[in-house]
Amino acid sequence: MPRQFYSENRDCRVIVDCTEFLIQKPNSPAEQQMTFSFYENANTLKGMIGIMPSGTISFISPLYCGSISDKEFFIKSQLMDLLEPNDVVMVDKGSQAEQELQKISCKLKCPKFLKDCIQFDASDRIENCKISNVRVTVERAIS
């Protein structure tokens, strides 16, 4: 684990990110609906990849229809079956898996949202930058 990462993310077990693959539009209306992703505004299949803090790919999920929610996708991927108590999972903004991880005594680490504020205070901005700088590694692995 890189020294910089280790000093602030010692308990991080895996850094995950989802990606969507564009597919040909199915002929069946039911299949079109199942594979349509509002995020991509196209028919897709969704996959998730997890890397260890060292950059080694440690998890690749099966592909699911693009219409699946991120929370449902996280649960169906069975990544949680591989985690141990007190592990930290680092994700991008918008993941809704915090409650599921708490049930197995794990933690979720992700950038903060601007809720009712106009901008972040300095400490939140610095923390978000640190998380984003680490998360770029999983995005490189996907590409």
Image (spheres, helix red, strand yellow):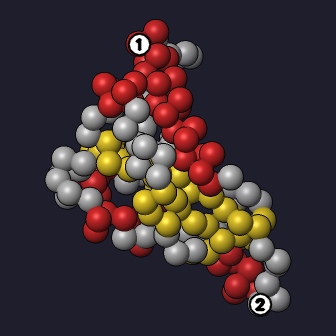
Q: Hey, which residue is sitting farthest bottom in the picture? A: 28
* Image quarter (top left, top right, bottom left or bottom right) of the N terminus: top left
Q: Is the residue 125 above or below the residue 139 in the image?
A: above
Q: Residue at x 32, y 42 (%)?
A: 12
Q: Amino acid at mark 2?
A: Ser
Q: Residue at x 57, y 38 (%)?
A: 136
Residue 72 visible in the picture: no
Q: Is the residue 72 above or below the residue 88 in the image?
A: below
Relative horizontal placement of residue 75, taking residue 11 as reference (left or right): right
Residue 97, image x and y in percent?
37, 54
Q: Residues within 10 Å of mark 2 (few under 14, many from 20)?
A: few
Q: Secondary structure at mark 1?
A: helix
- The image quadrant that residue 77 belongs to is bottom left
Specify the label residue 105 is tagged with.
Answer: none
Which residue carries the number 1 mark? 123
Q: Amino acid at mark 1?
A: Ser
Relative horizontal placement of residue 90, taking residue 138 as reference (left or right): left
Mark nearest the camera among 1 and 2 is 1
Q: Residue at x 51, y 23 (%)?
A: 129
Q: What's the CA distance linking mark 1 and mark 2?
A: 50 Å
Residue 44 visible in the picture: yes
Q: Nearer the viewer, residue 31 or 115?
A: 31
Relative horizontal placement of residue 18, taking residue 124 as reference (left or right): right
Mark closer to the chain start, 1 or 2: 2
Residue 75, image x and y in percent?
38, 67
Q: Hey, which residue is sitting farthest top in the picture? A: 122
**Total labels drawn:** 2
Residue 63, image x and y in percent?
57, 74
Which residue carries the number 2 mark? 28
Q: Secondary structure at mark 2?
A: loop
Task: Tell me whether the residue at label 1 lies in contact with that at label 2, contact meaning CB atoms closer than 8 angstroms.
Answer: no
